[in-house]
Amino acid sequence: MKILLYAHTFLPAIGGREIVMFQLARALIARGHTVRVVGPRGSGTGRQTADEIPVHRYPRLSTGRGLSDPLEQKILESQMGLQLAWDLTVNGADIIHSHVLYPAGFIGAKLGRILNKPNVMTPHGVDINVDRGSDYGMRLNPGLRQKINLALASADAVTAISEGVYAELLNTPVGAARIKKIPNGVDLERFAVAPPRHSVLEELGLTREAKIILTVGNYTPLKGHEDIVRAMPAILQQEPKAALVVVGANTGGLRELAHQLNVTKSVVLTGPIGMPTPSATNHAADRLAEIYRNSVVYVSSSNREGAEGLSLSLLDAMAASLPIVATNIVGNRDVVEAGKNGFLIEPGNASQLEKAVVEILSNGQLAETLGSAGLKKVQYYSWSSIAEQYESVYEEALHG
């Protein structure tokens, strides 16, 4: 099968959908399919990325006003539409799999109808989830909501990565019969070997006795980074060796909060850490995997329903055998079983967060038991299994 994965961004940009597309492409190629990624900004339509996945990047003009601006939408749609039409004409495809409902889903749907190409779509979070209290979600914008609904109405299939995304899709024109539940996946091999502990701690500026509390994700107010930092004084009172490591873009603002709470020595902000993409010439160490494997507990503290689709970082933590402390919201609930592979706490509840983290840090046997259960559970989410499920969706879209 000739599969076109379509989106407006891709690696080296770091985010959930970029990693999903990379891993899905690798897994589909391993299953014998021809796969290319089309649509990200750049130059050189034949440029290659890791593992010989063809990536067709096209230049784009932008007003810089953001996707909610009507003029930006017109410019983006005209450019990306012409580029996708050209790419399909020259290179062909059996199926278009669009990642994110706008712009890729909307443009892919239009071209799919014109060229009679089956269209599969995967929303990843902000394009389907909404939270009016924090003004989160593309569908709060009337213009974008209309375009997203048009895309969904014409999709041959739409995949839901979590129960929360499934519930939101039921409130759109897609119809339950065309919604397929397929979660995000995880690269199990990435966390199979534990790296030397001392070098990781030294790189982070921590002592050899440090007990790492890890959270990974680009900063937004919905991620609840502040909640973890605010819990650190109470955690340190009970576990003085505790250290919070926050990985992700735009987290620098947390430094002032750590200073106010007098915990700067115990809070490490790494900024974004890219995932090395293996190739014949790239043998770089996987720094993020090394941090996961040397941590004691993983915290997912998103504070609003809809803030998570299905967190790749959470799956990575389970693959690294880490016990989980996660807020009790959709997405997190899909994979965290309270008392089995971690703890579920109420969003924004500092007392519950502190208690759960300390309980794990102070009880090595509990941490090992929860981590082992998480590793066992996450086997279902291997990318080979996820690719097989997508393959079935593609076949159904192609042949009805």
Image (cartoon, rainbow, N blue to C red):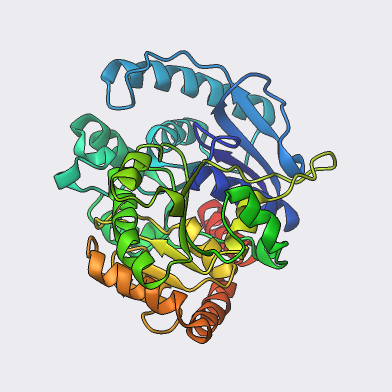
Q: Position of residue 16 (x, y in %)?
A: 49, 48
Q: Position of residue 140 (x, y in %)?
A: 20, 39
Residue at image point 49% right, 57% down:
313
Q: Position of residue 312 (x, y in %)?
A: 49, 57
Q: Position of residue 129 (x, y in %)?
A: 28, 50
| Vertical order, 364 against 110 (above or below) | below
Residue at image point 42% right, 15% down:
62
| Vertical order, 55 against 161 (above or below) | above
| Vertical order, 213 against 106 (above or below) | below
Which residue is more in the foreground, 166 or 292?
Answer: 292
Which residue is more in the foreground, 192 or 228?
Answer: 228
| Vertical order, 223 against 83 (above or below) | below
State which quadrant residue 391 falls in: bottom right
Q: Classify residue 119 as left or right of residue 128.
A: right
Q: Classify residue 162 as left or right of residue 346.
A: right
Q: How many numbered markers are drawn?
A: 0
State which quadrant residue 76 falls in: top left
Is residue 289 visible to us here? Answer: no
Is residue 349 visible to us here? Answer: yes
Residue lying furthest left:
133
Residue at image point 27% right, 33% down:
144
Which residue is more in the foreground, 90 or 271?
Answer: 271
Q: Classify residue 389 as left or right of residue 309.
A: right
